[in-house]
Each structure stands twice: as structure tokens, then as C-alpha cells.
Amino acid sequence: MKFENLKSGEQFFLNDFLYTARDQAHSRLLKLIKAQSSLPIDLSDSIIYYCGPSATPNGRVVGSCGPTTSSRMDMFVEPLLKAGLRIMIGKGRRSKKVRMLIKKYKAIYFIAPAGCGALLSTKIVSKKLICFKDLGPEAIYRLKVKDFPLIVAIDSKGHSIYEDI
Amino acid sequence: MKTDSLQHQIDKLVKRASFSLRPDLMNLLIKAYRSEPVSRAKKALGWIIDNARIAEKENIPICQDTGFPVIFIELGKDIKISADDAKRIEKYLVTSYENNFLRASTLDPITRGAPSYKGLSMHFEFNPALKGVKLTFLLKGFGSENKSQLKMFNPTAKLEEIEEFVLSSVKSAGPEACPPFVVGLGIGGTSNDCLLLAKKALLMPLDKSNPDKTLFKIERSLFKKINSLGIGPMGFGGMHTVLAVRVKKEPTHIAGLPVGVNISCHALRYASIKIFKL
């Protein structure tokens, strides 16, 4: 996916595969990276969506699945970028350090419509459990998304939509 | 499940609170959508309104964070309640979370481990003017709950200092807590009382003004000041950072002035029901 030319504030519709991961999954991935163990997901050119979906009702692909607060994952970002992570999706501001890292690694940070998990669930085509099943909603799932609405919050040059607040 | 059973009533309450927005809140969102001049902020409000309509139509949670369950049980003069009844209410809530595919979001705070449906915040109150029992179920998402603030002011503190504290709480909540907010402010009591008051302030009707004139003035002043912060829906700027400010107070000690702030995201989800037997 080409995203280097996207500018902060621009809208973008994502059609791709992404991994969900939030606090506990990040903590586990970091432990594995530190121990130089093999990872349960391939991070090269990967997309991570900070999300823990609600349970899946019968006949649906997924439950409600909006973004969670990204800043809680700030402290985990660098090793993941080193391992190949390119796109982060969540909600809210990031630390200055993360903004600098995004620039350094030519990554990008998108925000998904916050508090709109029902709407976003209609943009998900498939969902597969990948690892950390015991974490329930905090496990890592692979989602295929179609026309998933996003806004560039920090572009790969490090410009942030939230610079003023 | 009998339609008049406690279990059925609680199930109705959970469904209503998690799948649909209250009409008073929806009206404020629509009003905000119509008047928001910043195009990106308007788009955000449009998403929020569409999301609520999808959730209600398809019976899925408005937000994946189906909250930490908080239940207020207001007991009228003719009601007797036992520890067993409290256990039953808890059990029915858990069952309803599971049956309606809400998210398992609660766990031990130290060992963490696998999230479950266990744990809730239960509050009993007495209301001699009430017949029967009023149950109010609030589903509090933690994106906004994480931004709660407590400050123990000096008793001589000026109202402007309290306002300044609320404004700084809202600024620090920012886009992460999902604006436009409803802000609850609790003044008085002890440290924990003012925080509980702030949470209860969120449950005041949004289409009626505060009957207390002093508190009404504080609400109006804060409403204007917060909306000039420019955070806006989803942090996209614009004139709608807060949809409503609600303030409650109760007596406090001569040596202090406890103030609590509880913020709700744009999906303020609660429902009430009156029942006549447990």
C-alpha cells in the first residue's frame, strides 16, 4: 500500500488485512522480541489496529469494533517499527516520541472513527483468531477490511492533525 | 424468562443501554451536526449519528467497550431487599452481558489475566418519595473513565479555580476520551462522594435545565468555556467539545472543598427502569 504521500488530515479508505492488538498483546509481543523468540505474526509491512472487539453475535462477522486509546501503546511502538510495523490505527493523540519515530521509520498513524464500533463492524469482511486466545477480546485477530474509513493523524513526515491541542 | 421477571427487566435494561442512544442525547448530537461549521468535525458527528442508528437497527453495541457495569438501585419506602436480591441482580447482569454478546472487559487489577464478565459497581440509595425500585444501569467506557479527576480544594477557593480545574481536566481528556463529551461535576461530600456525585450528574436529563440556579449558572459558564477550547468532535476542532455539563452538590466539611470530574464520551449509555417487586 502507498501511503507516503498522504498528508495529515486526509481521509483514506483502507482495503487490506490488519491485526488487532491492544495492551496485553503488545506487552506479550515485546517480551517475545526481547527474548529474540519467533513471533506469532509477521510484522513486516504490517498494520496494527488498536482494538478489542465485543463478542460476535450469531450470523455476524464481528461484534462492535472501534479503536481504543492509542497513547497507551506509545511505549511499545519502537521495537515494533523496527520489526517492520508500518501502519498504526487507533484513536487520540500520540507522544512526541512516537511522532518522531513515525517520521524516522516512514510509518503512518491513522485514526478510525472513535466510538463508532457498530459502523466499523459493517466494513469488516472476515475475522480470524491468530494468537493469545486466552486474552479474549485482547487476543490478536486478523481482520480483512473493505472501505474502512480512516483519517491520517500523523503522516510519514511526522505532521500531526492534533498539533494545536 | 417471564416478561415481568427481574431477569427479563434487567436484560431489557442492558439491551437498551448498550444498543441505543437516549433520545435526549441523540437530539443534542443532531443539533450539533446541523450547526457544526468545521467540515471534518461535522463528518465526525455524522459518523456518530450513523453509528447509533446501525447499532439500534442491528442490535449490536454502540461501542465495543461495553463498559464497566455500574448500577444504581433506588429503593422506595415499600420495598424490602436482601443480600440474595443483590446477588440476583449481579447474576442477571452478567448473564445479560453474555447473552447479548457484550464484551468481557473486567479482570483482577493485579494479576490481570483473562477478561471476564465478573465485577460491577453497585450502589444502593433510599428514596421515601418513590414507590417500588428504580434501577439505573450505566455502562461506563474506560476511554473516558480514565480521565476522571479529583481535587481537594481549600474551602476558600473561588469558583473560577474550580472552573479552571474542570477545563484542565477536559483538555487532558482531549480526543482520546471521545468528544463531544457530557461532563459531570460533583462538588462536596468527601473525596469518594464527590466522584460518585460527578458520575450521577451524568445521569441528569439533558433536555431539562438544572433546577438549582447556582448550579445552572456554573453549567452554563462551563459549557461556553469548554466549547471555546476547540477540541471538537473526535478532536477535529469546531464548536462542539461538550454536549452538556451537569453539576451536583452536597454538604461538605468546613475544612475542605472536594471536587470530582467524571467525563462521558459521546456515547453516554444508561437506562432506567421502575419495578414494583424484586
Image (cartoon, grey):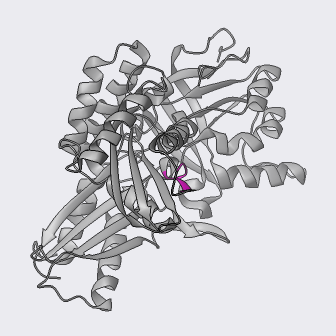
Residue toward you, A124 or A82: A82
Q: Position of residue B241 (x, y in %)?
A: 42, 30
Q: Is residue B138 magenta?
A: no
Residue toward you, B73 or A38: B73
Q: Is residue A71 visible?
A: yes
Q: Position of residue A22 (x, y in %)?
A: 62, 48
Q: Is residue B199 left or right of residue B74?
A: right
- Is residue A86 positioned above or below B71 on the image? above
Residue toward you, A85 or B40: B40
Q: Position of residue B71 (x, y in %)?
A: 33, 68
Task: Give, as a single range, the part of the protein colored magenta.
Answer: B145-153
Residue toward you, B203 or B58: B203
* Residue at horizontal 65 percent and vertical 15 percent from the top: A3
Q: Quadrant of residue B168?
A: top right
* Residue at horizontal 25 percent and vertical 52 percent from the top: B204
Q: Is residue B100 visible?
A: no
Q: Is residue B216 left or right of residue A113?
A: left
Q: Position of residue B33 (x, y in %)?
A: 29, 23
- Is residue A152 positioned above or below B265 on the image? above
* Residue at horizontal 83 percent and vertical 21 percent from the top: A104
Identify the image quadrant of the C terminus of chain A: top right
- Is residue B13 positioned above or below B228 on the image? below
Farthest top residue?
Answer: A5
Q: Quadrant of residue B14?
A: bottom left
Q: Is residue A154 left or right of residue B251?
A: right
* Residue at horizontal 79 percent and vertical 33 percent from the top: A81
